[in-house]
Image (tube, rainbow, N blue to C red):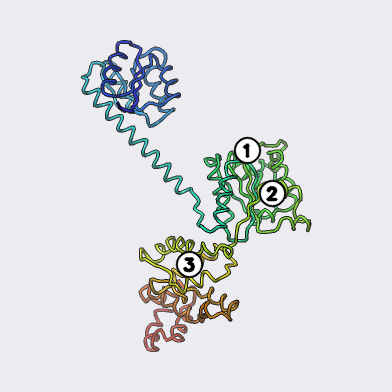
Amino acid sequence: MSDHTVLIVDDEESMLQYLSILLTREGYKVDTAKCGLEALQKMEKSPFDVVLTDIQMPGLDGIQVLKGIKAIDSTTPVIMITAYADEQTAIHAVNHGAYSYLHKHCKNDEIKLVVRNAVSLRKVKKENVQLKTEIKRSKKSTKIIGQSREMNGLFRLVDKIADTNATVLIHGESGTGKELIAKSIHEKSSRSKAPFVAINCGAIPETLLESQLFGHVKGSFTGADKDHNGFCQQAAGGTIFLDEIGETPLAIQVKLLRMLQEREIYPVGASQHVKVDLRVIAATNKDLAHEVVAGNFREDLFYRLNVIPVALPSLSQRRDDIPLLVDHFLKRHIAEYKGQLKTAVADEALNILQSYDWPGNVRELENVIERACIIRDSEKISAVDLPGINAGLEETNNSNPSVGTHIPLEDVEKAHIITVLNSVGGRKKQASEILDINPSTLYRKLLKYGIEEDSDVEAAEPVLV
């Protein structure tokens, strides 16, 4: 017995019985409707894989049924049943979304074939919809890398709090991934299909921040030539992420407090409030409790924000995750800078990466790996490709020889110049443009590092100028 369902719509009882018997014998689960309204009601309750509908019916005709079904489920194939006199109408219906049409007195084999093909089409369409959904989800999904005890604890907390409306305050050092955690909370919540709107409260001048957050009405200030919905209204139904909340001026803090308490805002220049339905996630790298004592942050706003505090560990607190993060960033950047070559990190270099304190956290690690992918001369990233990290370890761990050897800055510069020259086929003018230095400066560095013999460089100098 097939699991495929068919709905037959016709005001003629004999036609309903005939098609029902024929298709039931073919293994389909068949339901019937004697009018268009009944058909749409059944579609709303339980979608069908195929619908066969008469064109000429009292009340809703076949064209109206077609439009109604497509509005309910656009992937459902609709087959029009027509008398010969209605053939032009049937063709019109096909041009507007019907799968096909059948004459009322066509052969049984033709009916079976058209229905079977329609079922196959329905299956393909459903698979395409599911595939697109998965692709969209995978693009949207925020991947947070980590298997350490600290990160597993954080993941469990995110899962617990995600599908609630509680306000969240994320605290962590710069570069620890506060926005990634905020996005993860949003994507795991029932608000995931609505917008996620992020705003950096410390990056927008105070004179503009109120308008950006709450919007403004036409004529409220010079240049306000039309109404503008602020970020709070743009996040309707979803989540607003207030990054660097500790940088918010006190005057704006009062209005944020009202928004959190009453779920309403006043656009600049407006005389009426606007209700907003959104979830608030805030983040800071400051100690807001200390800022409250210092008088820089409102105590009542702090308590409103700090319903669910989430503390992000620094990278130095989860060193076990560094190899995973290195592998992730390598895969991201190696294809961009070196084609599809396989690459890896030498053991010595990985030891250096795991020993460094990472004041810039994950963001700094990604930048280091990206730079190493650019300047490396071999497949494996080695200690020489980590100049800044080596220097930092030399300063803080000069009594520990296992950390690594300091690499002179001149050696790094020489290696980088050679890499750039090789990438442009030895064309020095182009290399100087990439290096953002004058051709004459590049000429002197080539002499200094012995990259070319004097005679070769002199011959090339007219090209540089």
Few, some or many residues within 10 Å of mark 3 (<14, 14–19, 20+): many
Element under label 2? Answer: loop
Mark 3 highlights which residue? 369
Viewer-proximal residue among 459 and 189: 189
Relative placement, left or right, of 80 versus 322 is left
Pointers 2 and 3 in contact (C-beta within 8 Å): no
Residue 91 falls in which quadrant of the image? top left
Element under label 3? Answer: helix
Query: Which amino acid, mark 1?
Result: Asp
Is 114 placed above or below 392 here? Answer: above
Element under label 1? Answer: loop
Few, some or many residues within 10 Å of mark 1 (<14, 14–19, 20+): some
Where residue 266 sits: x, y (%)? 70, 40
Marks 2/3: CA distance? 35 Å
Residue 306 circle label:
2
Relative placement, left or right, of 396 versus 296 is left
Is 120 placed above or below 296 here? Answer: above
**Disc 1 vs disc 3: which is toward the camera?**
3
Mark 1 highlights which residue? 277
Is 32 placed above or below 162 here? Answer: above
Quadrant (top left/top right/bottom left/bottom right) for the C terminus: bottom left
Count of numbered tags: 3
Quadrant (top left/top right/bottom left/bottom right) for the N terminus: top left
Query: Which amino acid, mark 2?
Result: Asn
Query: Which amino acid, mark 3?
Result: Ile
